[in-house]
Amino acid sequence: PKGQAEDSLNMMPVLRDQAKSPRDVLVHNNKRWGIRKGDWVLLENPRDSKKADYLAANKFPKVQEGSEVLYNLSEDLGQRVDLLNKYPEKAKQLREILHQARSKR
């Protein structure tokens, strides 16, 4: 509708290899916010307590409720090694982009 933010883009040319993606950032919100830019992913409050048994059985690291995690998908596609403390500036950069996206809601 007029005066409302655009909620999607036509991705068909990208899927057909006719164009590059118009996006360089992907923001996700499904009760928890997350952002991906390039190979980096920042997730807020990433674990669901209902899935704790599954996560423990599959050797996912424990994450404190209310925290964030940072992953580099080029080195850790399974998202098992939290790099938040090792790369605080990368986390800060992604957090700022995420806050900007959230404020547009």
Image: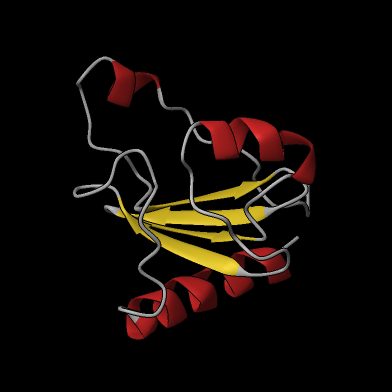
- Residue under the point 35% across and 68% down: 83
Quarter in which the N terminus is drawn: top right
Q: Left or right of 5: which side holds 60? A: left
- From the top left corner, tell me how far across and down residue 5 is, in percent: 70, 52
Q: Left or right of 61: which side holds 50? A: right
Q: Where 67 falls versus 72 (above or below)?
A: below
Q: Classify residue 45 by image quadrant.
A: bottom right
Q: Where 77 falls versus 3 (above or below)?
A: above
Q: Nearer the viewer, residue 88 or 9?
A: 88
- From the top left corner, tell me how far across and down residue 15 is, in percent: 31, 19
- Residue under the point 42% across and 63% down: 70
Q: How many marks?
A: 0
- Residue under the point 50% across and 63% down: 69
Q: Residue furthest front?
A: 57
- From the top left corner, tell me how far across and down residue 66 is, in percent: 72, 68
- From the top left corner, tell me how far across and down residue 91 is, in percent: 42, 75
Q: Nearer the viewer, residue 57 or 49?
A: 57
- Residue under the point 30% across and 40% down: 77
Q: Residue furthest top?
A: 16
Quarter in which the C terminus is drawn: bottom right
Colour scheme used in the picture? Answer: secondary structure
Q: Nearer the viewer, residue 73 or 61?
A: 61
Q: Classify residue 84 by image quadrant.
A: bottom left
Q: Nearer the viewer, residue 7 or 71?
A: 71
